[in-house]
């Protein structure tokens, strides 16, 4: 059992009572803190007597955790309040309402028992809010404007800044009060009269008759009913009175204008890690300003990335930023991130006196959490599973079913989301569907509560089911005209897709397989083929998915084969693709059968089974024609073109590609059309029209970039680079080569390095055009070796032809010729006229192409 370190049993006051009640319940300080959702340090400080009057919210949490009811609960609250001061007691000149020490989270340091308005201090990142709220108040658009938000969002400082702005332009008096716990309507009215210099509330109307007055009311949530009734009476007596209020929730008056005080803007994750850039974002600027108060040394460049991650993790919440920055006296930013990155809720303001309680972020969030009704708390716990931004539709899915014993949240989720936004627990940014996001500290707190109630596993399972359904709905759109939009939608929820997959792979592998089987195309477009294949292979091999829906398993097998092709491992997944084809044929699933024929065509080509690859292409074309599936017919025709190019039948390939291009344009198939045009550029290059190939390639390069297809874009860039080098435009070719190397993350400087095959081919061609034959031979050898086992044997042939043409070593030349003959025979490759010209009179005994007026003649 954890030892307690509080005062002894004989201690009097609230601290002694709390300790006795805790021990009677059989709880340690750690147990009580976990149940109540407050920090352990808070419990320890209270029991040590460091606070004679804790926050009311904290007392409520503790009483509920201990299980106090009836008279015991009332005595507990009475002990927490201590001796109650009459309204204005001890305040100079009859100051504002204050019957207890102010809540350090809610009032942002505005001291109680103070007449008038303190200076707001330097406010960062709120200039727009100050101007707009001031215009609302001065312009008479609303008699009551409420600044509402999570504790620590900076409501009070913003209100003070607005009041200061108005006071400089406003003809009438400006004053403010701080609401105290248990205040009555009379208390509020008396305090308002006092700060405006009236003897009693009845005199206010006469005293303020000459000019409109502004009243600032801070911490409304401490006595919301009393404040609402008092302001209602004041409005009836003084129509020209303007009220600016702060609180964790709206007051609820007619005509009230609610202004949510949201966290400060944080830098995006991909921001340039330069201090002058990052410091331009308000959240980072506030953090740096507070850091300078405790640390003299400037930020080291190595800390800038940590700064970005830290302020993003803190969600731009001012209180969180200030608490984290205070740690800068001892720790650098990387150390702060490492130490508190996974436990931001434990950040606390250090106690400065024996009477001050350390306020943690957990306390701040708990204060707003307690304002929610039980069903709203349950809903927040479910929503905490979202990792990033989400939509109303996704929220409705999460809330419509789940682990709560009371049943699903059956009502319309829109009022709930509005309520969470009004309390500052939820943010909405932008206008797209995925615009809602819980603050990280709110999400962490709600997840803690879900774990404490034993709900977390069930909530995560529901989350995985929701995202498996979303992915399944989007997957059919990952082809055709809607491709770009569909990929973008998945991009927006990528962190949730990853979280759903990770949790369900352990707890619910059937759902995980459903989710993963919908993602291969997205993984391909985003260059995540290795990761995606690993997920699919793990799930397919999991014995718990052996009895999964056969169609789901078949689509997963197609997906794992598609992804394997992207990194040269296609032949390894031939058994998976064959199994999928047989299953789709058994199920009568035409869509699955067509997709599998297409994949098998690629797999057999990579494995050197070109006849089998062509057979699958023709089977796909026949099935698509029989079912009148126009797009699949185009895909089959496009795939069959490769075999014509392999055999050197360039005119036939050009005619087929032109026909597919026309059909794709008519059907709005922009991606397929881009791929066709990329292949046309390669075909023109093979035909020796290098300048034309460059023009065609550059026209389609932008389209592939917009479509987010890095693999095909890189292949096309290689075509352009080779065509430029072959055309003698060596400076431009070198620029393309640099881009290829940057994309590959290569940077190899010579043929001895592990270099990319396309880069090696471009490098070799540039060297050959410069007359550097020895260097060219070395690079062509690298390209030939790197292309071996790839999808297109013609790449190997081209590299070997270049090696033969550039080397002066008779032994190396003979070896290259032998390899060239073997590759041509195995792949049924027909040498093009320019290739035959490069190798000279060598007799390979392999087919070659020659031009005739009647078309293309292939001979052996």
Image (cartoon, rainbow, N blue to C red):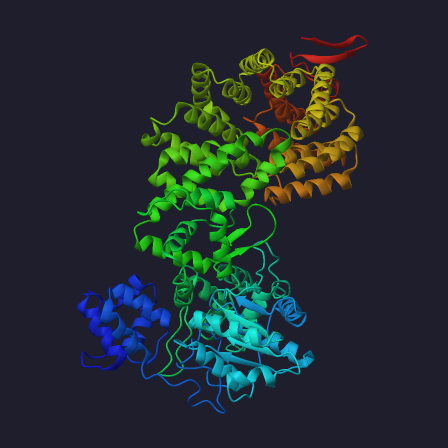
Question: Observer-nearest residue: 795 or 63?
Answer: 63
Question: Observer-nearest residue: 635 or 655?
Answer: 635
Question: Observer-nearest residue: 803 or 254?
Answer: 254
The spot of residue 430 in percent (x, y) is 60, 52
The spot of residue 223 in percent (x, y) is 43, 72
Quadrant into which the C terminus falls: top right
Q: Quadrant of residue 526?
A: top right
Relative placement, left or right, of 136 versus 154 is right
User: Residue at position x 36%, y 30% from top?
Assistant: 541
651 above or below 13?
above
Relative placement, left or right, of 189 versus 345 is right
Relative placement, left or right, of 401 versus 719 is left
Q: Quadrant of residue 811?
A: top right
Q: How many marks?
A: 0
The spot of residue 32 in percent (x, y) is 27, 65
Can the viewer see residue 298 in this picture? no
User: Farthest right residue?
Assistant: 853
Relative placement, left or right, of 816 versus 295 is right
The spot of residue 503 in percent (x, y) is 38, 43
564 above or below 344?
above
Quadrant into which the N terminus falls: bottom left
User: Residue at position x 35%, y 76% from top?
Assistant: 54
Can the viewer see residue 134 in this picture? yes
Question: Observer-nearest residue: 191 or 83?
Answer: 191
Q: Quadrant of residue 543?
A: top left
User: Farthest bottom residue?
Assistant: 93
User: Residue at position x 37%, y 39% from top?
Assistant: 505
């Amino acid at each position: 059992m954890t030892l307690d370190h509080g005062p002894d049993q004989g201690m009097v006051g609230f601290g002694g009572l709390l300790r006795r009640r805790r021990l009677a319940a059989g709880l340690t300080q750690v147990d009580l803190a976990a149940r109540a959702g407050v920090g352990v340090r808070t419990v320890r400080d209270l029991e040590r007597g460091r606070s004679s009057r804790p926050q009311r919210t904290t007392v409520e949490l503790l009483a509920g955790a201990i299980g106090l009811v009836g008279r015991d609960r009332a005595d507990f609250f009475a002990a927490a309040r201590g001796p109650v001061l009459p309204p204005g007691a001890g305040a100079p000149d009859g100051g504002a309402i204050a019957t207890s020490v102010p809540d350090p989270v809610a009032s942002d340091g505005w001291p109680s028992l103070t007449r008038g308005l303190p200076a707001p201090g330097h406010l960062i990142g709120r200039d727009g809010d100050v101007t707009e709220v001031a215009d609302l108040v001065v312009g008479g658009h609303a008699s009551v404007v409420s600044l509402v938000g999570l504790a620590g969002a900076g409501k009070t400082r913003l209100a003070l800044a607005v009041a200061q702005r108005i006071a400089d332009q406003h003809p009438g008096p400006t004053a403010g009060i701080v609401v105290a716990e248990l205040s009555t309507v009379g208390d509020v009215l008396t305090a308002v009269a006092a700060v405006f210099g009236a003897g009693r509330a009845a005199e206010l109307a006469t005293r303020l008759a000459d000019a409109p007055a502004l009243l600032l009311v801070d911490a409304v949530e401490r006595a919301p009913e009393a404040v609402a009734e008092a302001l209602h009476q004041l409005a009836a007596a003084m129509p020209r009175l303007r009220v600016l209020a702060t609180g964790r929730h709206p007051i609820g008056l007619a005509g009230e204008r609610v202004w949510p005080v949201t966290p400060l803007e944080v830098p995006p994750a991909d921001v340039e890690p330069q201090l002058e850039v990052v410091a331009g974002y308000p959240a980072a600027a506030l953090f740096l300003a507070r850091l300078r108060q405790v640390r003299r040394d400037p930020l080291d460049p190595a800390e800038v990335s940590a700064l970005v991650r830290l302020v993003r993790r803190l969600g731009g919440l001012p209180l969180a930023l200030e608490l984290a920055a205070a740690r800068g006296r001892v720790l650098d930013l990387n150390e702060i991130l490492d130490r508190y990155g996974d436990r931001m809720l434990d950040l606390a303001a250090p106690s400065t006196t024996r009477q001050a309680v350390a306020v943690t972020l957990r306390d701040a969030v708990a204060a707003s959490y307690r304002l929610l009704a039980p069903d709203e708390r349950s809903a927040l716990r479910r929503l905490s599973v979202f990792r990033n931004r989400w939509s109303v539709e996704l929220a409705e899915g999460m809330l419509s079913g789940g682990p709560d014993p009371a049943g699903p949240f059956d009502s319309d989720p829109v009022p709930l989301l509005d309520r969470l936004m009004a309390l500052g627990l939820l943010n909405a940014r932008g206008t797209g569907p995925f615009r809602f996001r819980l603050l990280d500290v709110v999400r962490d707190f709600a997840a803690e509560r879900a774990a404490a109630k034993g709900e977390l596993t069930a909530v995560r399972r529901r989350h995985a089911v929701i995202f498996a359904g979303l992915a399944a709905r989007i997957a059919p759109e990952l082809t055709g005209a809607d491709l770009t939009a569909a990929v973008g939608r998945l991009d927006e929820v990528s962190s949730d897709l990853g979280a759903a997959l990770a949790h369900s792979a352990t707890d619910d592998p059937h759902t995980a397989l459903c989710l993963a089987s919908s993602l291969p195309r997205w993984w391909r477009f985003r260059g995540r083929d290795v990761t995606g294949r690993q997920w699919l292979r793990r799930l397919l091999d999991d014995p718990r998915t052996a009895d999964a829906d056969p169609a789901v398993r078949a689509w997963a097998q197609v997906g794992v084969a598609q992804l394997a092709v992207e990194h040269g491992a296609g032949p390894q997944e031939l058994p998976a693709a064959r199994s999928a084809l047989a299953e789709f044929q058994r199920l009568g699933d035409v869509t699955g059968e067509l997709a599998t024929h297409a994949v098998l065509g690629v797999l057999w080509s990579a494995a050197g089974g070109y006849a089998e690859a062509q057979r699958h292409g023709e089977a796909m074309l026949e099935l698509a024609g029989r079912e009148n599936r126009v797009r699949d017919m185009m895909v089959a025709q496009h795939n069959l073109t490769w075999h014509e190019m392999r055999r050197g039948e360039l005119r036939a390939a050009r005619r087929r590609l032109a026909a597919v291009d026309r059909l794709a344009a008519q059907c709005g198939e922009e991606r397929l059309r881009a791929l066709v045009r990329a292949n046309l550029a390669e075909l023109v290059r093979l035909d020796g029209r290098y300048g034309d190939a460059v023009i065609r390639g550059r026209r389609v390069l932008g389209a592939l970039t917009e479509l987010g297809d890095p693999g095909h874009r890189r292949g096309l860039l290689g075509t352009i680079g080779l065509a430029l080098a072959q055309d003698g435009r060596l400076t431009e070719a070198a620029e393309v080569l640099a881009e290829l190397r940057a994309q590959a993350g290569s940077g190899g400087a010579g043929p001895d390095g592990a270099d990319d095959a396309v880069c090696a081919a471009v490098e070799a061609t540039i060297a050959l055009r410069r007359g550097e034959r020895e260097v060219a031979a070395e690079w062509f050898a690298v390209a030939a070796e790197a292309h071996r086992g790839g999808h297109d044997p013609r790449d190997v042939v081209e590299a070997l032809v270049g090696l033969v043409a550039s080397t002066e070593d008779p032994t190396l030349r003979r070896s290259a010729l032998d390899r060239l003959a073997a590759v041509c025979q195995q792949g049924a490759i027909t040498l093009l006229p320019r290739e035959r010209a490069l190798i000279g009179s060598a007799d390979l005994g392999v087919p070659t192409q020659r031009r005739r007026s009647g078309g293309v003649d292939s001979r052996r």
